[in-house]
Image (spheres, rainbow, N blue to C red):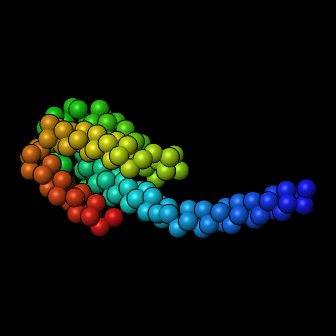
Amino acid sequence: MDQFILVIFVGLFIAFILMKQIKHFTDRLPADTQKGDFQKYANFSVAVQNMVRTIKNDIDSAKESENPRFILLEPLDEKESLEELADFLRKLVFFETLLAKNKSAKEIEAELFAILADLDTFVRERCQDGEKLADELKDLLFDDFQKA
């Protein structure tokens, strides 16, 4: 019976040491990278939001901006265009929330790509010199992504 208690004691001691080692190892896993990736996407989302706000301010006739770069081809589409830009902003705010942390990097990138593709299409189809502006927008956002 004494040997049985000794075996249980040694087994518990080994289990305790293993648990400590596993905890130590898992604490050192790249959890910081996941937080860093989330922060990178959140920062990039803010940059895209700022760009969408710039486009929105240029298009909005109620706000007179100096030297607007983004001018609608069809001024009658202003209300619809402003609503679409507001939708982009609502979608982009998601990437700053805690809900975005629950998604993988691939999911976030796919959603961001879809928003950016829609924004690109919006600028190309609805703005004067849309092709040129869309290309400039891509370059600016690419630089912002690299900095984020």
State whether residue 53 is above or below residue 43. Answer: above
State whether residue 30 is above or below residue 100. Answer: below
Task: Left or right? Give the position of 3 relative to 18.
Answer: right
Task: Left or right? Give the position of 111 relative to 123.
Answer: right
Q: Residue 116's spot in the image, x, y percent?
A: 26, 45
Task: Left or right? Give the position of 136 relative to 85.
Answer: left
Of residue 44 and residue 13, the one placed in the foreground of this image is 13
Please report the residue visible at 71 percent of the width from the left and 64 percent of the height from the top: 14
Q: Does the image show residue 91?
A: yes
Of residue 98 and residue 140, the one placed in the foreground of this image is 98
Please report the residue visible at 85 percent of the width from the left and 60 percent of the height from the top: 3
Outermost residue on the right side: it is: 1
Please report the residue visible at 65 percent of the width from the left and 63 percent of the height from the top: 18
Please report the residue visible at 26 percent of the width from the left and 49 percent of the height from the top: 55
Of residue 14 and residue 106, the one placed in the foreground of this image is 14
Q: Which quadrant holds the N terminus? A: bottom right
Q: Does the image show residue 94?
A: no
Q: Which quadrant holds the C terminus? A: bottom left
Q: Which quarter of the figure has residue 11?
A: bottom right
Q: Which quarter of the figure has residue 7?
A: bottom right
Q: Residue 93's spot in the image, x, y percent?
A: 43, 48
Of residue 15 and residue 8, the one placed in the foreground of this image is 8
Q: Residue 68's spot in the image, x, y percent?
A: 19, 54
Task: Left or right? Give the position of 78 relative to 19.
Answer: left
